[in-house]
Amino acid sequence: MTLRRALLSALLMLSPAVAAAQTKLGGISYSWSLPRGELKGFVDNSSRVGVNFEGRSFKGAHFALGMLLGWNEFYSRTAAPITFANGTVTGDQYRHVNIFPLMVNGNLYLGSPGHTRPYIGVQAGAYYTAQLLDLGTSQFSSHNWQFGLAPEVGILIAARRNAYAFVSGRYHRPLRAGDYLDGAPRTFQYISINVGVMYGP
Amino acid sequence: MMRALSIAVTATLVAAAGACYPDRISDQGSPDVVATQFDSTANFHSIGTFGLPDSVVHFIQAGQADTISRQYDAAILRRVRQDLTQLGYVEDTDPIASPPDVVAQVAAIATGSFKYLSYDWWSYWSWYWNPWDPTYGPDWGFIYPPHVVTYAYPAGTVLVAMLDRRSQNPTARQIPVIWSAALVGRLSGSEADLGSRIAAAIDRAFAQSPYLGRP
């Protein structure tokens, strides 16, 4: 990068007019996730496989509405016993869960447009969860849709003209529902840490 | 930019829908799965004697041939006998003189998937039961405890079922199955150490059933 371009970028980053002009943003993020609760009971491994596609539309200087489509994958191999009311199953297992959040969100941004801006928000929408269990050479699977919420905190960092970086954390909390492999409704919760970029038109 | 984003979304959805399962167990992976079920109302501590039919019955679907080797039958029965004895139960080798409290039936699924919970018990086991108690007959059957998981086990599965004569119901012609173990697909293996793996699986069935045994 030439000195001239670096100076221009710095000026753009400091310009309040830049972010104010970006009323719509679209972006992509890498998502690292940590299972919690009942999901942790099924797959006790953090997830390094995740991605989100997000769009946000500012309504004024501090509030934005948005949408999110995500994918988080959890899996582990274990020989831990599966115990149920009248029995036990032991053997090598492969446990796998794909979760696809399809959410709308509202976000409150602090600070002023064009600067680094912390924000808080909440996602609400549907989770599609595909659960798989390989037990020896037998396979069992379940698929469920359920409503859920995900509070979020993050920070939006102005990088270049029309370009932003962001880091966020979400606590995904589907409401207890569905018919999972044990025949019961479940809530597969997890925390996701997301690092991504957003662009404006 | 929106075009690039659309392509990225589509590519990710296709990849996810493609059901990529990293680190998944291959078909050649370890099939050593042992499932045990029990009747939580049964009193396993008060069992004194057990009967053990001296053959492994092979469940064969009509019109099909038995493809399961009997090479390990004797070893399987020895191991079941050993594990039951170690629990403090005493083998009853003369049921005509004194019927046992429970009978441990050992079977193997020889063909296809077999509906273990609904098979014709008498046609497979009458040779053992009828000589020492002629009141048993084809109108008798099993009764399973509530919440037993219905599952069609694959060929090669070794099954052990413990029938409780003490709580049989002559009026309803039913004998309760108070414990069962399934060594899923175990006899279909071809490993060089198959015999020892079968023995280990039988041991595991008893080990994961801590409610068994005399106090």
Image: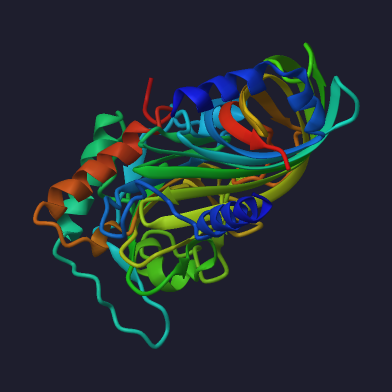
Q: Is residue B122 left or right of residue B95?
A: right
Residue in the picture at 65% in, 58% down: B172
Residue positioned most to the left: B192
A165 above or below A84? Answer: above
Q: Position of residue B112 (x, y in %)?
A: 39, 73
Q: Position of residue B17 (x, y in %)?
A: 55, 58
Residue in the picture at 41% in, 45% down: A94
Tell me where residue A75 sits by quadrant.
top left
- Give the mark count: 0
The quarter of the rendered structure image containing the C terminus of chain B is top left
Taking depth in this image into account, of B100 and B182 the one nearest to the observer is B182
A157 above or below B158? Answer: above
Q: Position of residue A52 (x, y in %)?
A: 62, 40
Q: How is the image coloured?
A: rainbow
Can residue A132 be seen at all in this image of the molecule?
yes
Q: Is residue B57 left or right of residue A43?
A: left
Tell me where residue A114 sits by quadrant.
top right
Residue positioned most to the top: A111
Taking depth in this image into account, of A126 and B10 the one nearest to the observer is B10
Taking depth in this image into account, of B176 and B160 the one nearest to the observer is B160
Residue positioned most to the bottom: B63
Q: Position of residue B86 (x, y in %)?
A: 25, 31
Can residue B98 be seen at all in this image of the molecule?
no
